[in-house]
Image (cartoon, rainbow, N blue to C red):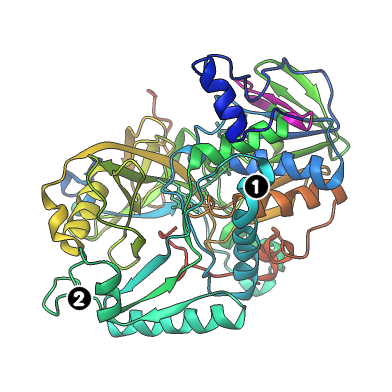
Amino acid sequence: MLLIPCPWCGPRDETEFTCGGEAHIVTPRAPEDLDDEAWGEFLYLRTNPKGRCAERWVHTHGCRRWFNVLRDTVTERILTVYEVGARPPQAGDD
Amino acid sequence: MFDRYSIFSLARNALSSHQNWPRAWRNPAPRRRYAAIIVGGGGHGLATAYYLAREYGIRDVAVLERGLIGLGNSGRNTTIVRSNYLWDASAQLYEHSLKIWERLSREINYNVMFSQRGVLNLAHDAHGLRELRRRVEANRLNGIDSEILSTAQVQRQVPALNCAPDARYPILGASFQRRGGVARHDALVWGLARAVDALGIDIIQHCEVTAIRQAGGRIIGVDTSRGPIDARTVGVAVAGHSSVLAHMAGFRLPLQSHPLQAFVSEPIKPVLDTVVMSNTVHVYVSQSDKGELVVGAGMDGYKSYSQRGSFPIVEATVNALVELFPSFRRLKMLRQWAGIVDVAPDASPIISRTPVGGLYFNCGWGTGGFKATPGSGHVFAHLLATGEPHPLGEPFTLDRFVTGALVDEHGAAAVAH
Ligand SMILES: Cc1cc2nc3c(=O)[nH]c(=O)nc-3n(C[C@H](O)[C@H](O)[C@H](O)COP(=O)(O)OP(=O)(O)OC[C@H]3O[C@@H](n4cnc5c(N)ncnc54)[C@H](O)[C@@H]3O)c2cc1C
Ligand SMILES: [Zn+2]
């Protein structure tokens, strides 16, 4: 069971949250200017790293706010949480 | 060729107390160069090697496996085999595989214990039943055996199932594929390994691919934990680790890796002689020959490579199981585990060329690729040998994530197997 530190509500069980997938994917401002390749890349291609990854999570059964999580996909450790829109912090420890 | 297994070899070996069975495959050291390399010694990799040699005469091949063969998802799955997928493209691919399953034991002289005990998919609400009807009709148009059972017929087929109208998950009907069933996962891996080895292919265990070497946009070889190996054709079939291999080669895939769990109960007397699946409540169950209930769960909602799986999923699955089968309430679960499954946005596989010349990927089988093992190997071997997709594989290339022609099997596959 992950214990996820919601920036507003504190540490809560994973069952209260929903993972929204990879963070820092910027929605293209003018999709009509993109070719199919670039649009497909935006929609479908993901890094899916083994190790450290940045994700968006929402506290569905709580404050219902979105935030970013830096998590290790091998150890399951949550390294840090940070605001949507902020740059991923360089968490010191692994 | 290998020593044939038969009633006579069994009797002969019984005379020496089964101490003199020859080893089923060699354990060679890697050579410096092969015509083709397969990365991943699961069922898909081994089946690919088998068809490369058998159908295309390409025997200068090595299968590189990081650990021991068959300890990935091939040895961790709940072994459900069926072909009742919704769309033509998937139905044909999975049916191709099911037809091979029906003759595979004889073909490779190894009993893969394919047991066509039928697969039921339950409907718990009116919409679910309509969706099943639609799927059954689509299956029939594709020549795949598929039928709808009424609640009474389901109850007759599976007496232990709670079909009462006031059940928490009332059963309004089910689809039934009689030719579906289960097989023995280890036997598939071991049988294929023995056949592959007999065809002269090297199966190299404890050999992890650590880098993909390229020159001028095409592959020239791989680096491994046992040294560099050259090859101009490399096929990757590493399931949950596909994105890791793609990263080594410098591109991304439309995949996410999630843990998928299963568990088995203590062994009990025969109680269930078919396979029961419920997509709505995420539980799948069959009974093994040893008497254990083999229970498949849903997938964790976030990506992970941890091979553990989260506890809330265990809870939800067991809840659903005892609602469907009240008499299972007092059973103890003996073992629990997870495999890392590679899921594509449309829940369909990827059998494809890549941006790197000579490098091919077979992945995205996610929660449901065991059933596809022999068919997948056959179709992938065609791609490796000819450089062109097999007709059955054409809808499943990476191109679909540019054209938008997805093969959306969430209804038929999603978390289900
Ligand atoms: C719990 C669970 C239940 C399932 N139930 C079903 C079911 O009922 N029916 C069904 O059809 N499917 C089911 N599946 C899905 C099915 O197991 C898989 O789709 C299928 O087995 C994948 O086979 P594979 O050979 O591609 O992968 P694997 O068997 O995982 O083989 C991949 C191999 O690649 C190796 N590898 C990884 N990285 C490297 C590297 N760098 N170098 C060398 N080797 C490497 C791994 O060690 C592994 O042995 C289930 C899966 C799970 C986890
Ligand atoms: Zn909160």
At x 71%, y 43%, the residue is B48
Q: Which residue is mark 1?
A: B106
Earlier in the chain: of badge 1 and badge 2, it is 1
State whether residue B172 appears in this view.
no
Residue B321 appears left or right of B84:
left
Q: Amino acid at mark 2?
A: Pro
The residues colored magenta run B198-210
At x 55%, y 78%, the residue is B139
Residue B312 lies, in percent from the top left, at 22, 48
Local secondary structure at mark 1: helix
Above or below, B172 relative to B230: below
Callout 1: chain: B
Residue A49 appears left or right of B54:
left
Badges 1 and 2, same chain: yes
* Magenta span contains residue B145: no
Local secondary structure at mark 2: loop
What crowding class fits label 2: few (fewer than 14 Cα within 10 Å), some (14-19), or many (20 or more)? some
Residue B208 appears left or right of B341:
right
What crowding class fits label 1: few (fewer than 14 Cα within 10 Å), some (14-19), or many (20 or more)? few
Disc number for residue B170: 2
Residue B60 lies, in percent from the top left, at 84, 30
Callout 2: chain: B
Residue B222 lies, in percent from the top left, at 75, 27
* Magenta span contains residue B202: yes
Which quadrant, please, contains the N terminus of chain B? Answer: top right
